[in-house]
Image (cartoon, rainbow, N blue to C red):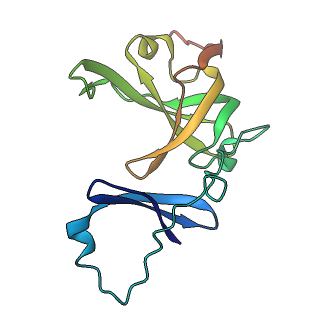
Amino acid sequence: MVRCREKIDGHAIFCITKDQDIVAQVKLTDGMLEYIPKTVPLNFQLAESTQIRKTPPAKAIGLQIRDLTAGVKKVNLRAKVIEKPAAKKVFSKYGDVLLVSNIVVSDGTGTIILPLWNGQIDTISIGDMIQIENGWVKKFRGELQLRVHSGEIRVIEHACEHTT
């Protein structure tokens, strides 16, 4: 459904919903609206805030990696580090240079990428068992990632080191 949320000063803001979930919001100028054929019905009644709701993100309670999907929040799980690529330099949206290593972790049910940033990188090794608290899942460049910003990543069991 397309609804006009607001119409002021030469433009209108339309909200596109599906099953009462917000899909997109679009701002169109009066000039743009002239190009829409008159046969297309536009609802210029303002939508009431109670009619439009944003679906709250799913919360992970006892989920395993195989169960994770984009948007899941409050992820708490234990996983083993199975891959740790060399850190690479990236630029933040503010122009800062950062280091990132997109490690791969597994809990036996699946694998997921877990980005480590700057000082986190040297604290975790391949083979370590880690505890992730308050993570969230995002799809980035076509792959699921488990991210931890305000949460915590802790090594609970260091990888065995063998000397020959």
Residue 19 visible in the shown view? yes
Q: Position of residue 114 (x, y in %)?
A: 50, 32
Q: Is residue 10 left or right of residue 103?
A: left
Which residue is painted at 29% across and 59% down in the image? Answer: 11
Q: How many marks?
A: 0
Q: Residue at x 60, y 29 (%)?
A: 135
Residue 95 image position (x, y, % from top left): 20, 23
| Side (left or right) of 131 relative to 61 | left
Image position of 122 with respect to 134: above or below: above
Instruction: Please tell me in which quadrant of the rendered image residue 111 appears.
Output: top right
Q: Residue at x 56, y 40 (%)?
A: 137
Q: Report whether residue 159 is seen.
A: no
Residue most extreme to the bottom: 39
Give whichever of 71, 120 is nearer the camera.
71
The residue at the far front in this view is: 9
Farthest right residue?
62
Front residue of 14/145: it is 14
134 vs 93, left or right, is right
Image vertical order of residue 117 relative to residue 112, above or below? above
Q: Nearer the viewer, residue 111 or 145?
A: 145
Q: Position of residue 50 (x, y in %)?
A: 67, 54
Q: In the displayed structure, does residue 17 sit left or right of residue 122?
A: right
Q: Residue 134, how many percent across, how many down?
A: 65, 26
Residue 156, above or below 82: above
